[in-house]
Amino acid sequence: MVVFSSCLTNLILNWRKPFVIKLSGISKTFKVAKRSSGLKNAVKALIRPTFTEVEALRDITFSIEPGEIVGYIGPNGAGKSTSIKVMSGILVPDRGECSILGYTPWKNRVEYVKNIGVVFGQRSQLWWDVPVIDSFELLRDIYNVPQEEYHKNLSLLVETLDLAEIIHTPVRQLSLGQRMRSEIAASLLHSPKILFLDEPTIGLDAVSKIAVRQFIQTINKEKGVTVILTTHDMNDIEALASRIIMIGKGSLLYDGNLQLLRSQFGTHKTVALDYVHNDCKPLYIPGVTITSWSTDRAEMQVDTEVIRISDVLTRLSNQVELLDVTIDAQPIDDIIIQLYKEHQIS
Ligand SMILES: Nc1ncnc2c1ncn2[C@@H]1O[C@H](COP(=O)(O)OP(=O)(O)OP(=O)(O)O)[C@@H](O)[C@H]1O
């Protein structure tokens, strides 16, 4: 299994480090009513309902240090949102322990939530019909934020998230990107130490995505906020997270460094060559898959576990006069898909 050695190494390395988040053996099963189509079956289900169980989380264990940005990834239905709900105290797990800043999230909830911020990209914590600023003021009162702290945070958030022009607009009139920036601001008004972001860039255009990413980096660097980020966008992960935790079908599949994941699993490189006009046919080289070949340019995938790039170039330079070479690492998306396939969770 790939939970693997890096997981074990992490556990050993982190043995004595302080943790802000520690999950140990967290499991959660949902009981779902079975429904078949047709009126007869609907009546039957009403009289004698039958249930099936969905194991959303199975024995999830990991720890996170203060100031980390962790990418929490996995395919649809993997259990990411369920994990975030457990960590933010919305859901109580069936088994296992969870300690966040010394709190058990689903106990002492009122005190606990003063320390965390949560953004669900698909749901809003803002009041739909009132201007953004009114929601902010309500949240200030709910979290009991002192006036001075509130105003300091508000002006910083308005400036960095570019909210000045939309703060008096009712939420229902905002674009998705404007709403998301307001949601993120709302989650930070009470100066939380930990921020849970569940798909914060979903549906955003490229400019808004970059703005959200830059902001996450800023609050992490300048305020030391620990960030747990779930996303399907690997660009978010590459831009923000040096560590990823990957789950699939409720189980932990990988916990480790993004670069390590690349070097362990990213064994394919894309090589493009430009050469002096030449009519020769492509060479067969084990470990090399030619994806295009013309009289002055060739593109290929090289499996670096089979052959080194330098050996490929030496063999090809015997055949053509090289003008230019471009080598691209395997995109992280491909590596992730490969891992999902290996675990049969795609
Ligand atoms: N309230 C619920 N009742 C029943 N089943 C649920 C409930 N919430 C989640 N599940 C199930 O638990 C599993 C994990 O769901 P979860 O929403 O945590 O996945 P996810 O990784 O966040 O997926 P996505 O990327 O699609 O948002 C899924 O099979 C889902 O159908």
Image (spheres, rainbow, N blue to C red):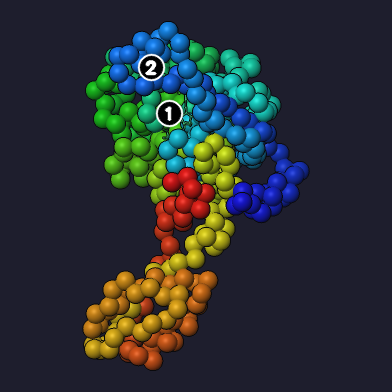
- Please name the residue shown 41% across and 75% down the image: 288
Q: x, y (%) of residue 139?
A: 45, 16
Which image quadrant for residue 296?
A: bottom left
Which residue is more in the foreground, 136 or 22?
22
Q: x, y (%) of residue 99?
A: 67, 28
- Please name the residue shown 39% across and 20% down the image: 35
Which image quadrant for residue 214?
A: top left
- Please name the residue shown 42% across and 87% down the image: 315
Left or right of 4? Residue 120 is left
The CA distance from mark 2 to mark 1 is 16 Å
Which image quadrant for residue 231?
A: top left
Q: Looking at the image, tell me whether mark 2 or mark 1 is earlier in sequence order.
A: 1
Whether tag 2 and tag 1 are in contact, CB under 8 A, the answer is no
| Crowd band around label 2 with a 10 angstrom C-alpha radius: few (<14), some (14–19), many (20+) | many
Residue type of the residue flagged with mark 2? Ser
Please tell me whether mark 2 or mark 1 is closer to you in this view. 1
Residue type of the residue flagged with mark 1? Phe
> Considering only vertical position in the picture, is 262 above or below 48?
below
Residue with the most extreme right position: 16
Residue 103 visible in the shown view: yes
| Crowd band around label 1 with a 10 angstrom C-alpha radius: few (<14), some (14–19), many (20+) | many
Q: x, y (%) of residue 101?
A: 65, 29
Q: x, y (%) of residue 5?
A: 66, 54
Mark 2 Cβ and ligand 1 under 8 Å apart: no
Of helix, strand and loop, which one carries label 1? strand
> Considering only vertical position in the picture, is 68 above or below 87?
below
For disc 2, the marked residue is 135
Residue 23 visible in the shown view: no
- Please name the residue shown 61% across and 51% down the image: 1
Which residue is more in the foreground, 56 or 102?
56
For disc 1, the marked residue is 120
Number of marks in the rendered image: 2
